[in-house]
Structure formats: C-alpha cells, structure tokens
Amino acid sequence: MADEKSDDKAARRFKKGDHVEWNGPGKITGTVEREITERTRFDNKDYAASKEHPEYLVKSDKSGKEAIHRPEELTKTDHVKK
C-alpha cells in the first residue's frame, strides 16, 4: 500500500498559478510559477528535471522567494488570502 501512495505523489502534475504548500520551517504556501522539464541550474544547485519527471518553480506567499520542488513535496491547496 505504501508504494501506491508514493506512486500517486510522484504522478502529481501542477500548472502555473496552482496554489500549493510544502514543508520548510513549518508549512509554507505559495504559487507554482512554472513546470521545469529539463536539467536546470537554480540558486547554485542542479536539478535533474525531465519531461517524465518534472519539477516546479514555486514562489512563497510570505517571503516572495522562489524555490524548485519535486511534485511529491507539494500539495495543492485552496488559495485563501489573509
């Protein structure tokens, strides 16, 4: 059963504008800026994204900082402005 859940997470796809959350120092919320489908260097780190295994550039709601995350690290949420 655990393998099925991880497969579901790996199969997640997001699109620009999706509101998501991820773990950092607490729950962080933000918006998907774009899907990355090729090897990319960002913030002095290499990301091995591909069409089969995309990663996502997200922008934090609170800080405005951008980061790249794998789809299994992201959860789609309802966007609620406070």
Image (tube, rainbow, N blue to C red):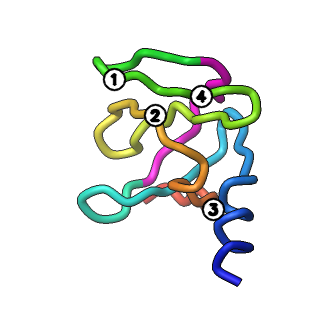
Q: Nearer the viewer, residue 68 or 27?
A: 68
Between marks 3 and 4 in the image, the one whose residue lies nearer the viewer: 4
Q: SS of the residue at dot 2? A: strand
- Label 3 sits on residue: 78
C-beta proximity under 8 Å, tags 4 and 2: yes
Q: Nearer the viewer, residue 42 or 2?
A: 2
Question: Start and end of the magenta stretch?
Answer: 29-38
Instruction: Pick whichever of labels 2 and 1 is earlier in the sequence.
Output: 1
Q: Position of residue 6 (x, y in %)?
A: 64, 66
**Alpha-carbon span between mark 1 and mark 3:** 30 Å
Q: Position of residue 38 (x, y in %)?
A: 63, 18
Neighbour tally class for label 4: few under 14, some 14-19, many 20 plus, Cα within 10 Å = some
Between marks 2 and 1 in the image, the one whose residue lies nearer the viewer: 1
Between marks 1 and 3 in the image, the one whose residue lies nearer the viewer: 1
Residue 45 is labelled as 1
**In the displayed structure, would residue 41 be above or below residue 66?**
above
Which residue is painted at 72% across and 63% down in the image? 7
Q: Position of residue 42 (x, y in %)?
A: 39, 19
